[in-house]
Amino acid sequence: MNDPQSPKKTNHQLETIGLMASGIAHDFNNILTSIVGQTSLALANLPPENEARKHIERVVKAAEFGTSLTNQLLKFANDQNLAVEQVHIDDFILNNRPLFQMFLEHNIQLIIELEHDFPSIVIIRSQIQQVLINLIVNSVRAIGDKSGHISIRTKTVDCCDFQIKLNNGRYLIPGTYLRIIIEDTGSGIPPHILSKIFTPFYSTRAKGNGLGLANTAKILDQHNGGILIKSKPNRGTNASIFLPHSLKMPALQ
């Protein structure tokens, strides 16, 4: 019997993603451009003290971020080269905190605890931003209407003396890694679902497209890193992102 998650099948699914992304990107960008244009006109006609301004400004920011994600999806689908940048990950996370807050509900608290002494690393900024948002959005959905929190922590991990096995069965190459931990107090993931969450198009939600974690895993693979998700029903979820201290990205250069 063929393995439903074999590399051959996964590659075919990713090719399908590429065709689908190319087909919808132009239309979706046109819709977002219209949203930004109309909301900007609304802002221009509202006095500074109007209570509606802050809500419309959030719509503008969300639409602009949607445009960025659409462009990323096209580049992901077409394997286009993206610029790498040297960043200090703690500054990166703190600077993105207002963006992360946009995806939270009023019942969810965001906690950030950073190690601060990790040296700067080389990443594709927009892609790692997308990875963090994908995981935060999943945590928000897992918490639902209950009160809860999502924490983001950073720490240094040296896997020279032990092996770290990722969800896809691959082991991290020995070396020093930055570990970004996103942990929530949500409903957790049953074991039979946890084994499938990185399969393209697999989703437990009626309106889910099953692309978020598949895209996340590919981005981290391209960064020579990876992701490990641990979860139990009613015990929350712990997602660990691993990014290498020394980065070479032959697939993107």
Image (cartoon, helix red, strand yellow):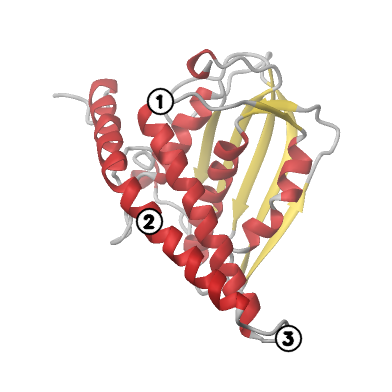
What is the quadrant of residue 10 in the picture?
top left
Which residue is painted at 52% across and 65% down in the image?
143
Find numbered disc 2 in the image and state the secondary structure of the residue it sits on.
helix
Which residue is tagged 1?
79
Earlier sequence position, callout 2 versus callout 1: 2
Horizontally, is 95 left or right of 229 in the view?
right
Tag 1–tag 3 contact (CB < 8 Å): no
Residue 1, percent across and down? 13, 24
Q: Residue furthest right?
A: 117
Which residue is tagged 2?
30
Which residue is painted at 45% across and 66% down in the image?
35
Residue 118, percent across and down? 81, 30
User: Disc 1 or disc 3, which is closer to the eye?
Assistant: 3
Q: Mark 2 is on which residue type? A: Asn
Tag 2–tag 1 contact (CB < 8 Å): no
Which residue is tagged 3?
49
Q: Mark 1 is on which residue type? A: Asp
Is disc 1 surrounded by few (<14), some (14 to 19) or many (20+) residues within 10 Å?
Answer: few
C-alpha separation, residue under disc 2 versus residue under disc 3 = 31 Å
